[in-house]
Image (cartoon, helix red, strand yellow):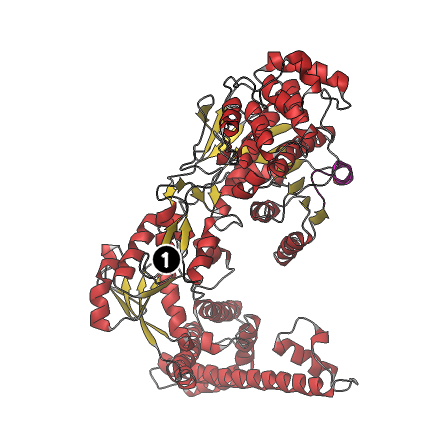
Amino acid sequence: MGMIRNLRLKLWGRQREDGITDYRQPTGDGGRKTEDEGVNSGLFIRRLVIAAITTCALVVCWWLAYELRFDFDVPLQYEAQLHHHWIWIIPLQLGFLLLFRQFFGVYKYFSLPELQNLAYAMALCGVSLYGLRFLDIGFSPPMGIILVQSMLGFLALGTMRLAWRVVHEQYFSRKNHDCFAARKIAVIGAGDVGARLVRELHARPNLGLVPVVFLDDNRRKWGSSIHGVPVVGAPEEVQSQKEKLGLEEVVIAMPSCTPKRLGQVVAILQKARLKYVTVPSIDQLTSGSVRVTQLRPVRIDDLLGRESIDLRVDQIGGVLKDRTVMVTGAGGSIGCELCRQVAGFQPRRLLLVDQSEVQLFQIEQELIKLGHGSIIVPVIADILDQPRMHAVMQQHCPAIIFHAAAHKHVGMMETQPSEAIKNNALGTAALAELALDHQVERFILISTDKAVNPTSVMGASKRLAEVFLQAFAREHGGQTRFVAVRFGNVLGSSGSVVPIFERQIAEGGPITVTHPEVVRFFMTITEAVGLVLQSCAQGQGGEIFVLDLGKPVRIVELARQMVRLSGLQPDRDIEIKFTGLQPGEKLFEELQNLRANCVDTSHPRLKRLTSEPSSLKTVRAQLSWLKRDLHSATPDDLKAMLKRIVPEYTAHFASLAGEKAEDRGRIAEGDEAAPGDPTAAVPLEEEAKAPTQRLVMALAEGAEHLAPAHRQITASTDHPNDGPLQWRGGGSS
């Protein structure tokens, strides 16, 4: 019984003995036992049938080899030899076929890999027989017969398997799925991906797609055919082919084409009023995570994307591999992608820091599914909670910190500037202080292009964080490398206009756009994070890296393109409504201010901004003033204070009656206040008694005024300004 059991295990190809139910063992689940025994018995019988058919085919091939060798007049002595050889040569060949798993395949999917294994099995068996022939031991067949029989056996077994696949595809599959109405499709792209797609569609008629024509830009392919499907011309001929062949749908099989060409093809298909889908991206196809037949609609990021980034993988891996890496804001859009890409460089430990348990759980489960469960450590923490962050760093000793935690919603931060300042500026400063205390090697701040000549509180708070980081790097650059990275709007992120437009289109409109001339820089989240990692590897400390943002995109054109991608027409099916610029928004984003110098780096998609850092003592004092009146000052007063610290910031104040609003704006711009205005600056010697928000507006003219004011206020308050920032209290990460 044990021998039979072992034989069954070998024939069924099972890897674990406990995967087979033994009928002698008692079980409480009689139904499951009966079902498993039925399946296993079916497999066993099927493989025995395959082995029997293969044996018969090999016997016939040996007989035919002798007949061909002797011109169908086999001498009697060789006929006797033939019968003796069958006894041991056929089992030898079956053994080699078993070694290459020729009895375990599903022949309706028989393809080139299985054909290669069959060739290896027959060739290896023939070589073995040749070896016996050279040993001259007296019972090996003639060399000519060995060669002929090996070739005949390969042809016979290969033909049998291929015939079964053809019969299955041409008869059984179509008979079983005749309820599907097959749609005639054109495939744009006659390359490797297009060929794989057509082969898969032929093998899976249940998908209901019948490829009838290829369209390709390569003229050398015109007039040829791939898997029986002709290549007739360029994609521009799709209209004529639609009328000629009755095309109902088009599959775009060009995963590596440029976004510009893809946009042209999409426009052609929209004009021809044909439905269209595309194959997955080239990254997904090469990784094997999807099949070529997993078709999807063309997305807006396919049209806005750019050429793939040539990352210096070795350089990035040298920084991240076997190191402990911390990502703050790990549950956000940027933080999640940072975690995915960093995990791919095999860090020793990856700390996922976020205060949202729901988002943290989601990225944790995703990374576990991707096979990184052994290196990740989810940490629920607020970056403003210094005791908690101190304990986390003390326990795990991170070598690299990617600081992505931030408030990024422009409109919401305009009405609540205290939260933007607290989280984006004060939080960054406090985390940088902790990084220095715990000897972190690299600290990378995720910044934004809105920090350039900011018109919003969010952008100004990010700029203030950059200013602190540069000053801090000059003071302590030899211990920790502090770097900031700016990039534009990320497609598909939680704050992007793309999901908002998608929801408005699904609801039937209207699509709301702030201004017909507003433009923005867009980049894919994968591209942005890849360049962040490249900046981490290149940064020496104190730099602000700017990513190559490409060409700006008009938001109204983006909206119209998304409407067309959904099969509708803008301004006819979906209304586009202009609502006007909101406070803090501007028509266009800038890449650098006039005081910064932009220089090239070793990577063509990265630029480095250099400027003279501010005094760390001055910046700390400014942050301390902001922190002191963070929750007592009005939003407009906080904006005015922020304007004094970030001179390039253009503040938007709430509507106030009469001259008060005008004078407040004039003071924020640095003009002289009107006599008797309640927001006017008081004399320096009385500043200790005045409201702090007025004092900051008066003293922030320059460092020479800041120092004496700082000394006077320090004497009358309990808030020291010279030491590191200490923030205790709640906040958002």
Amino acid type for the residue under numbered disc 1: Val
**Is 719 rendered above or below residue 163?**
above
Quadrant containing the C terminus in the rendered view: top right
Count residues near mark 1 (Cα–Cα under 10 Å), then give few for <14, some for 14-19, many for 20+. Answer: many
Residue 545: give x, y in percent of width and height.
Answer: 51, 31
Asked whether 472 or 453 is in front, the reply is 453
To which quarter of the image does residue 193 belong?
bottom left
**Helix, strand or loop under label 1:** helix
In the image, taking residue 472 as reference, residue 221 lies left or right, namely left
Residue 677: give x, y in percent of width and height.
Answer: 56, 21
- Residue 450 counted in the magenta span: no
Which residue lies at the image location 43% right of the left edge and 72% below the top edge? 143
Residue 220: give x, y in percent of width and height.
Answer: 23, 56
Residue 148 appearing in the image: no
Which residue lies at the image location 29% right of the left edge and 60% below the top edge? 270
**Is 324 rendered above or below residue 138?**
above
In the image, taking residue 368 as reference, residue 566 lies left or right, namely left
Which residue lies at the image location 57% right of the left edge and 85% below the top edge? 48
**Is 648 rendered above or below residue 557?**
above
Residue topped by disc 1: 563
Residue 553: give x, y in percent of width and height.
Answer: 37, 43
Asked whether 26 or 360 is in front, the reply is 360
Prevailing secondary structure class for the magenta stretch in the rendered image: helix
To which quarter of the image does residue 234 belong?
bottom left
**Is 613 rendered above or below residue 414?**
above
Quadrant containing the N terminus in the rendered view: bottom right
Which residues, given as a range, are shown in magenta?
Answer: 381-395
- Residue 394 counted in the magenta span: yes
